[in-house]
Amino acid sequence: MSRYRSDSRPTRARLHYPLLRVGDTFNVIPWEAAIELQARVLKGIMDKHGADDLCAKIYDHGGGGGGMENTYGTGRLLFTGLQMKHVGIHNRPGYSSETWGTRDRGVHELNYCYEDARLADTIVLWGSNAYDTATVFFVAHMMPNLQGATVDEKKKHFAKGEPAEAARIVIVDPRISATVNAARETGAKVLHLRPRLGTDYMLANAVARAVWEKKYYNKDFLNRHTDMGSFEDYKKKSLELQMPYKDFMARAQKITGVPVAQIEQAAVWIAQPKQAGHWRRGLVLYEKGVIWNYRQYDAVASIAQLGALTFNIGRPGTGTGRVGGHQEGYARPDYPGPKPPPDVDKFVQDGKGKTFWIIGCNPYLTAQNNAYLRKRVGERAQALTDYLSLKKGDAGEPGSIAALADRILEGLDKTGGLFVTVQNIYKVESAQDAHLILPAAQWGETENISLNCGDRLLRLDDRFMDPPGDTKPDWEIHGLVGQKLEALYKADGKADIAKRFSGMDWHHGADVVKSIQDDLYASMNTKVPASEAGKLDPESFKGVDYAYLRKVGQKGIQTPVRTNPKTGEPVGTKRLYPTWNFMTKDGKFSWYGTRPWDDFVSADTVAGYLKSSRDEYPFWFSMGRSQPLWQTSYHMRHLPEKTLGTPLPFVQINLADTKMLGVMSGDVVMIYNDQGNETFAVYETDAVPAGTVFALMYHWLGTSNSLTSPYTDPMSTNPWYKGTRVGIRKLAGGIPGILATASFRPTNKFT
């Protein structure tokens, strides 16, 4: 069994010192040299070609536990200092929000609190396998409500005479997920809608049309707190009131695959008023099944608008937002690029840009269509590496960091190459083509503050161990690069540019927090009543520092943080929009007419994005994460307990399809299409419908994103991970033989 074990335990697998590529190997170099090289290359490119030739992929949500300090560090250097526009957020090809569809309506996606899951009459999980990916939230808060254990809590918050009973749950997911099974085990009333891939925004609009037809809406709320001008556009384009209801619903059923009766049942459960005219309380939550889908902007917007139409925002037991499942931590200066942002993946693949800084993420696993990304980045990085290698007649290696930087800049111009820097705690797949590797410290090795993604509870994670070797927190690395750039520009006599990098001489996380307060919150008026809290940055924490968070401990404080006008003490915000004063200029919810369904006459037309044939690629392909491995397995791959349990990435295949393919559980198959191919172990199940397969998204021996298309939503530059078409072929031998003999490096046609 030893071959299944990782090479080392996590502490030994970690990076310890900066590394510089020399030919095909890496040499340890001092931090001072690494920082100077990174700064000189960035400056040389910016001076000669401008900021547009600087490219980066950066962590999101606090940098894998790195908190507000790390996100501020990247933003302060990349956005304020370098004014970089070609930036992607970990798995995304651009600096885009996953939730513009709701933010543009005036509603932040984190507007509810965990208590609302205990008070709701109906819980809606749309594209969220919460039992797997937000387990505590589901088990500790949703499940008691489904079991009727929170009825007494409801009576304390509900109006006099308002009925209180166990919650119902609506789950929208093509698969019979663990959440579906867990909900059924509680004995609750469960409605499971199973739409075809990519049809979520049509399904949400169909549920909304049923709500409208049945008059399950609060006219007073709509008239007083939503923009009735844009509401007309919503009624025309999203609800299509000009089309007879029967025809509309018949088309919705044909496209989504969800029966009209189930669509109407969802409308009843979510919005039908209770006895004595009390409005139903629905908690409408979505996640990656929506966020990573076709027409992502419209899908998120349609769910936000369903929440507004059904009066499910701002009241106890209501809310319309995302589930989350990990820590959050945004404290960045404004992004200097356009909206929607440019696609940095495509930019680099097309031979543009001269540097690619990969910070706290692993795009060789997580980027869409990443087999081609790996190929192009590898080719361009190698072109520069070859130029830097000694050849006959060369005078020798550059004798200083400044001379090496000049040689790199010369090579970039002559070869069309790419200077790749990877900053991470591990030597991840994306580091295989790097020229410079910067070792980072992780959570627990430095203080950081972050909030949970459900109810915005801000807390401090104190340092409790030393980082290995000479690793540094990401914010410190960015601060050092910023200081070096400031010094270089001062030496050039360019004080105006040097000023953009000033103030980055941070020595402790508390210094970064002070910069956040001074830079982002100094002019923010937080002496506002609770009714105005929705106008503040939902993750802002003015007046909160390490000392305060240590004092309150795990109790924390919910953002946005207001200021008590009498005492000056910070005041948390339980839930947003209790008086429906939204984040728009006039405080009213802004409606949006979703894009037409005309090009989606049937679900099959989506395959046109992939230029593929149904005969050649007969299966719909989707992917997601798995609780035992979680995220990208960046830690898990170093734990034998985890690698033994999942030695290969797996694919779920319906029993009817395994019979047709002649495979069974434990067999190994190759899944392929025009984008790439990967190897998976088969898991037979009825969880997926016939004709659709579901694969593990990330694994150290393969990533499903080799198979995804390069399509992004033009309104948000967000990728479409949850729908592509594939073929499947069985490989000879079982898992032991495959592991012992097979290559896991994908081959591709790249046509």
Image: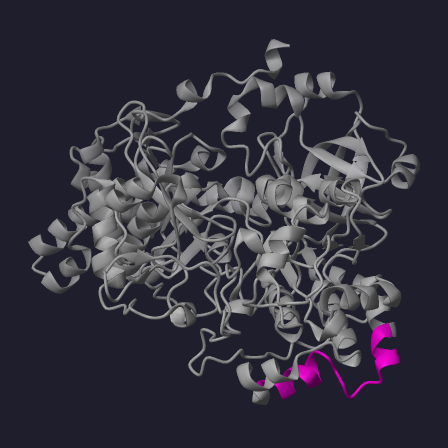
Q: Residue furthest front?
A: 160
The chief SS type of the magenta part is helix
Report x, y in % for residue 567: 23, 60
Q: Nearer the viewer, residue 429 or 276?
A: 276
Report x, y in % for residue 516: 26, 55
Report x, y in % for residue 522: 22, 64
- Which residue appears at 16% of the width and 35% of the height? 400
Question: With respect to residue 157, does 243 lie above or below?
Answer: below
Query: Where is the N terminus found, in terms of image quarters?
Result: top right
Q: Quadrant of residue 524?
A: bottom left
Q: Nearer the viewer, residue 106 or 393?
A: 106
Residue range highlighted in magenta: 230-249
**In the drawing, does residue 134 fall left or right of residue 191?**
left
Q: Quadrant of residue 205?
A: bottom right
Q: Quadrant of residue 126?
A: bottom right
- Which residue appears at 41% of the width and 62% of the height? 538
Q: Nearer the viewer, residue 657 or 728?
A: 657
- Residue 330 can be seen in this image: yes
- Is 415 a magenta residue? no
**In the drawing, does residue 258 fall left or right of residue 484?**
right
**In the drawing, does residue 731 fall left or right of residue 362?**
right
Report x, y in % for residue 176: 79, 45
Question: With respect to residue 465, does 718 lie above or below?
Answer: below
